[in-house]
Image: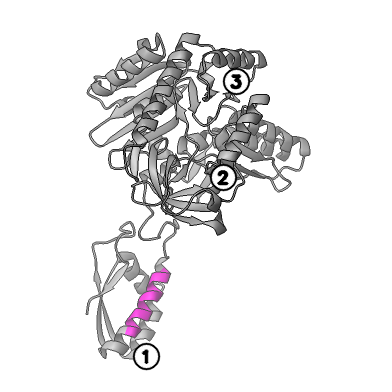
Amino acid sequence: MNKKLIINVNVSETRIALLEDNRLAEFHVERNSHLGLVGNVYKAKVSRVLPGMQSAFVNIGVDRAAFLFGGDVIDPVWLEAEKQRRAQEVDDRDPRTLANRTPIEHLIQDGDEILVQVAKEPLGTKGPRVTMLVTIPGRYLVLMPDFDNVGISRRIENEQIRDDLRARVSSIKPKNYGVIVRTAAADVDIELLKNDLNYLVSVWEEINKKKTGVAAPSLIYQEPDLILKTTRDLYTEEISEIIVDDFQAWSQIKHFLLSTVPGADDKLKFYADQQPVFDAYGLELDISQALSKKVWMPSGGYLVIEQTEALTSFDVNTGKFVGHKNAQQTILRTNLEAVRDIVYQLRLRNLGGIIIIDFIDMESESDRQKVNEALDEALRYDKARTNILGVNELGLVQMTRKRTSDSLERVLTDPCPHCEGSGRISTVETEANNLVRDIIRWVITKKSNEVRVKAREDVIRWFSEEGLQMMVELQDQHGVSVEFEKTKLDISSLREAAYEIIF
């Protein structure tokens, strides 16, 4: 697969697009007004411990209090037992996914100063989520200062390679430090691993040194900006080009690649054409389509994507695709095609949390199994951690996908102030009936029998056609004269009211 990274930088924001075979696969944006928090390390002050919720709110110095789950609080006794267990057996699990069971009120108290790392960005009305299990990611390794073992990325499946990496990293790992070997380390020279590890240890030592000299809340360590972080996490040998339209960003990436990925700087290109780089690669249209509720598939079927506060749903439909043989084959083919597009949309839109997929009902157990297997295979290439419950008899799949930041829709859009995010607006007839009730209230409260109304053209037209009898009865029953005045508004002017009584 041919991949490219396209990086666009301007005064207020940075945008990064990952292309796979010239198709937009991932899109990341960071604005100067909302810099990302994930990965940052803070000296925080505990604001309130909630024993009944086994959690706490802590002040890290940002707008909203951060949320600390009890399982993410370090218990020295649990930590020592976990170290001993890992010293005796191979355990590649990320320690951040393991929770200690000691009640939180026995570990921290209101007013305590603790070291925490942001694990999730603020989402909606929720503040950031933090953990006391700090990890420092590098290009090839992730440092775990609280542990003393070597874990291997689950994406490296070859057991011989896993054993070799574990032995190599164990030979260079300082005592009392844990390390997770990332997928990118599978075939690199040990000197690069050593350089990466030395850098990460120096970062942790600097964090330890700095935390003793500042008062909480304070920022102790800040993750690299979006450009370096994305290049670090997304670069693979499959990347054929990294195209950047800003010279400072180009220099920043070149320095990073020279020090971490020998030879990769040859793929770095500075884009100097007058045409905007995203326009040159046709990305603006792709980004706008990534916000669409309906997504058409090549066969003629389509997906309907709905995001709510609690979950995201995918509804699979055959649409224009009627097949060539029989209904069972048509349904199976549509569902299998939908699997690829659903996983693509999950990555592109950065969707996380609970995901519900409503496939077209399949009567055959073997067909459901084929769809299950296709979904498992497609998700292997998704870097985000997922957990799937197979297709049930109703054709539904329930899954979760790790979410660390807002979806693309929530980054780029606001809820419509007219429909308040429902995606629906009142019909003309509903607005007309609301107007009639308001006129009656006006007549009663103002003791006036003359009313002048400014209204949208479609509302006035409704009263002159379907609603003519209603207006006649209103004027007769209440002895009121209603005069309409046309506004400049139309149905697309959603930020304005449909009508206004002005006299």
Q: Name the residue type under label 3.
A: Ile
Q: Nearer the viewer, mark 2 or mark 3?
A: 2
Mark 1, secondary structure of its residue: helix
Determine whether 492 is above or below 391 in the image: below
Please rate how many residues cluster around mark 2, counting C-alpha atoms within 10 Å: few if below 14, some from 14 to 19, many from 20. many
- The numbered mark at residue 171 is none
Q: Is residue 145 left or right of residue 446?
A: right
Q: Which residue is labeled 3 in the image? A: 156
Spot occupied by residue 236 in the image (x, y as percentages of width and height): 47, 18
Label 2 residue SS:
helix
In this rendering, position of residue 21 left or right of residue 81:
left
**Side of 171 where 420 appears, left or right:** left
Judged by depth in the image, the label closer to the viewer, 3 or 1, is 3
Going by the numbered disc 2, the residue's amino acid type is Gly
Q: Which residues are magenta?
A: 429-441
Q: Contact (CB < 8 A) between labels 2 and 3?
A: no
Residue carrying label 2: 71
| Residue 345 located within the stretch drawn in magenta | no
For label 1, the residue is 477
Q: Who comes first in sequence, dot 1 or dot 2?
A: 2
Q: Amino acid at mark 1?
A: Gln
